[in-house]
Image: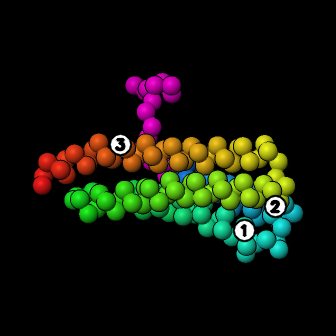
Amino acid sequence: MSVPEGLRGTGRLEVIEKALDLADYTITITANSKIFLPEYQRSLTDDINRIALAIYVDAWTANNIKVTNEESYMERRRLQERAARNCNNLLALMQLAQKVFHLKLKRIKFWGEKTLNVRGLLRAWRESDYKRYAEALKKRS
């Protein structure tokens, strides 16, 4: 029996899928040299892509850490937090890109919503991990 879509919880891999989608979208739109001018490639566009990729890779890596002790829990948490911080950095770079490349507000809103969604999922995942692991690890010590 399937669960109606409105009643489904967030899947464990949804954050990874959304981070992948954000990285893919970012790389795709920044590849348009008519909008993201080549003269700004090294000073801005490369940074935008690097941050989007880092969000995805940190989320992927965190997901692949099996939490067995406090050290593995802390490493996973560190990666989750870094990915969330990089969402903030990407938002800042988007704001700059809007000015430099004269991006339409509609594009920035769509791109920004993707980024905010990933950041929210990362924070929810971190909180879920805290409830799941931190308390259990405290009891072991």
Nearer to us of marks 2 and 3 is 2
Q: State the SS at label 3.
A: helix
| Image side of residue 103 versus residue 82, left or right | right
The label shown at residue 128 is 3
**Nearer-N-terminus badge (1/3):** 1
Nearer to us of marks 1 and 3 is 1
Q: Amino acid at mark 1?
A: Leu
Q: State the SS at label 2.
A: helix
- Residue 86's spot in the image, x, y percent? 55, 59
Residue at (12%, 52%) from the top-left corner? 140
| Viewer-proximal residue among 73 and 4 | 73
Q: CA distance from mark 1 to mark 3?
A: 35 Å
Q: Amino acid at mark 2?
A: Val
Q: Amino acid at mark 3?
A: Ser
Residue at (73%, 73%) from the top-left corner? 43
Is residue 4 rendered magenta in the image? yes
Report if the CB atoms under discs 1 and 2 are less than 8 Å apart: yes
Query: Relative to 123, does residue 58 appear above or below in the rendering?
Result: below
| Image side of residue 52 versus residue 137, left or right | right
Dominant secondary structure (helix, strand or loop) of the stretch shown in magenta: loop
Query: Relative to 51, does residue 1 appear above or below in the rendering?
Result: above
- Residue 54's spot in the image, x, y percent? 54, 64
Is residue 121 rendered magenta in the image? no
The label shown at residue 44 is 1
- Classify the position of the C terminus by image quarter: bottom left
Looking at the rendering, the stretch of residues picked out in magenta corresponds to 1-16
The label shown at residue 100 is 2
Q: CA distance from mark 2 to mark 3?
A: 39 Å
| Image side of residue 30 versus residue 47, left or right | right
Q: Quadrant of residue 52?
A: bottom right
Q: CA distance from mark 1 to mark 2?
A: 9 Å
